[in-house]
Structures are given as C-alpha cells and as structure tokens.
Image: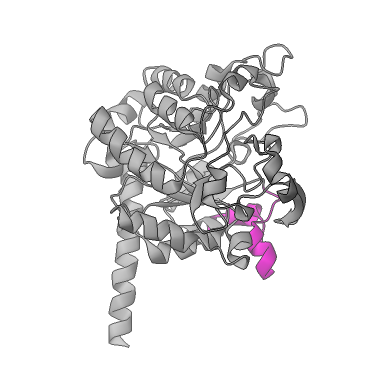
Amino acid sequence: MATQESQHESTEQARTGRRALLGAAVLGAGGAVLGLSGTARAAGAGHGGGVRSLPVPTIIGHRGASGYRPEHTFGSYQLALDLGADIVEAGDLVPTKDGHLVCRHEPEIGGTTDVAHHPEFAGRKTTKVLDGVSTTGWFTEDFTLAELKTLRAIERIPANRPHNTLYDGRWEIPTFEEVLKWQDEQTRKRGRQVWIYPETKHPTYFRKLGLGLEERVAKLLRKYGKDKRNSPVILQSFEPTSIQRLNKLVDNPLAVLLSSADSRPWDFVETGDPRTVADLVTRKGLREIAGYAQGIGPTLDLVIPKDAGGRLTTPTTLVKDAHAVGLVLHPYTMRNENPFLPADFRKGTDADAYGDAFGAFQVYFATGIDGVFTDNPDTGLLARADFVND
C-alpha cells in the first residue's frame, strides 16, 4: 500500500508540475488571473524557457495560416511561422491504412484534396458513419501512405477564400513525422523554438478500426525526444478519454477541446456517459479536467455566447472558473471573413469580405483568455499588439 501511495503521489506531483508549468507560463506569467494590464502581461512572457517563452495572449496558427493557404500543408504551416505565429496547429492527425499518421482536418479527404480527380481511386468513394454522422467520400484509412502521397491539397472553403484556390495542387499531404522533422529544421533556421499543437481526430472511431491514435502519437514523440513536459508540443482532442490516455503515455502539456454546450463528446456517446459539454464547463467538470489536462480549447461561444441574431452577449464565467482550477484557455477560431465573425463585427454581406476582426479580437482578449486559434495569425498578432499597448 505504501508503495502504491508513493507511486500515486509521484504521479500526481508530475501532473501537478505539468499543470503548473503551462499555467505559470501562460497564466501566471501572463497575469490573466491577477488582472494585470496588457503591458504587464506582455512583459511577463518570454522568461524561463519552455512554455514560459510564449507570449500571452498566445497566437496559434489554426491549421497553419489557413486564411491564406490550403490548410494542413507545409505552405500553410510555413506561412504561419513567417507571419509570426507563436504556435502552429500542425496538425489534425488521422491514420492511413498502413498505420501512418497524416495531417488532415478530417479523415474524409474529398473536400481537402484532389482525390476526386484521380480515376484510379474512384472505387474508393464510399459512405461511412463517422461519429454518428453519415459521411460520403474518400477516407484516409482506406489509402496507404504511398497512395495518399500522390494526392495534392486544395482549399476547403473556396466560397470564402477564392484567392486560396490559386494554390490548389501545390502541396502534398504531410505526415506527422515530417512535421516533427520540419519543426526541428525551422527551429534551427529561425533561431527560436517552433511550437506545434497537434490534435487526435476521432480517436474512438479509429481505435475501433484497430488504428489507435494515441500510441502512434506517443511513439513518434518519444522517437524525436518530444514527449517531455518541457517539449514544444501541446496535444489536444475533443475526446476527454483520448487526453486521459495520452496523459499516461507522455508528459506533454494536454488540452481538452470543447464544442457547443449542448453537444456530447463522442467517446461519451460510445460509453453511455450522459454528460454534455455544459457539464464539463461547470466548476466540477473543470476540476475533473484539471486532474489530467493543463488546458481547454473551448469554442468562442462558450466564452461569449451570441444571441439569436449572432451578436455577442455577456461573457460567461468560464475564463474565471477555468483559471481557478489552474487551466489555461485557448479558444477557437478567429477568422477575418464576415460569415465567421459575430454579427456586430461584420461589414457588408460578401462571404469572402473581411469584417472588423480587430474589434472582435479585442473583445475576446478582454475576457482574459490565454490565447486563441486563428486562421489569420498576422491579424491576431496586430490585435494583440493593440491590446497589450492599450
């Protein structure tokens, strides 16, 4: 019993230390809970190494710089760094038939690659039930890595980003291992540590197919020496049990992603857990998350809800409640185009026209969030400069 207790204490100390590292870096050093001014927050960042080197609010390049290049390509990742993103979300991880991890927003790749124009793969088009939703298209788990490498990425939302279609066909699908190598190369070339923020996609779905994601992620992180609590890799997932599994495999900072309040994580659906996201963002739910993760990635609507007309209302207590249990918040996703902005920050009605993204950033930053995912890292960085110097 004494041995088990000491092991438990050691494990808890390690987890507490990991939470403290991320929390002190992005929260304490940033001063969000203490209510310090924006200038004080900026001054507190950049000391102590590791996560402490990250400024607050942290600007995270969502799938790279996907506002300007097809998402989850090295073109998008590279541009995010060129624009100054603090972290690059590289990438959403899904497996191939032969067990490799590749970076795609979803396993269905009809909308993000040119697979439909490859007659040799016409027979691979099929309909599957993905987390309860009937989905038709082509799926990464039905292709070998070699086959996927013959495809090229295309813009996912051309109606909103017609200019990005200029780059259709230019880049192939990156593997997670290639991303880890690229991270090291870019760190050397730029003379600063490059951070990435990968996500396990649909882990319950893939585990049932015999393609468990977490073990593959952990194996690659260990191979490249990036499985430590100081490693420049934050892992995230919409499925809490995936984060719990990763918590046992690696020591990286971990974050639970949270969708709309009335939704249920798919792993909860599969196991009969009746809780919704609304339950997870209660103080009790947040305390539970803090037992195995260091942060949360809520949808922006959980930070500031919208009314029926799409306008921002009063902020919730989520920021305060999460900070109270030591969790940091990296909400998603800020985009420049009108359809993705709150109604009070839109300009005109064009689907691809920019609204007042700077104004929206300021309102969200003022809630005390520790960072934000954005398709437009340059806009986010300028908005942060305005905020911290205000």
Q: Quadrant of residue 205?
A: bottom right
Q: Residue furthest bottom?
A: 1
Residue 87 percent across, percent down from the top left: 40, 35
Image coordinates for residue 132, horizontal then vertical, percent: 75, 56
Quarter of the rendering containing residue 148: top right
| Residue 323 appears in the rendering | no
Residue at screen point 24% across, 34% down: 188
Q: Nearer the viewer, residue 357 or 170?
A: 170
Q: Is residue 301 visible?
A: yes
Q: Which residues are magenta?
A: 261-283
**Which percent across, then down, holds residue 306?**
69, 32
Instruction: Name the image quarter holding residue 113.
Output: top right
- Residue 355 is covered by the magenta coloring: no
Q: Position of residue 303 (x, y in %)?
A: 58, 38
Residue extending farthest to the top is 348
Give the vertical position of 356 relative to 304 (above or below): above
Picture quarter with the N terminus: bottom left
> Is 144 left or right of 263, judged from the image as shown?
left
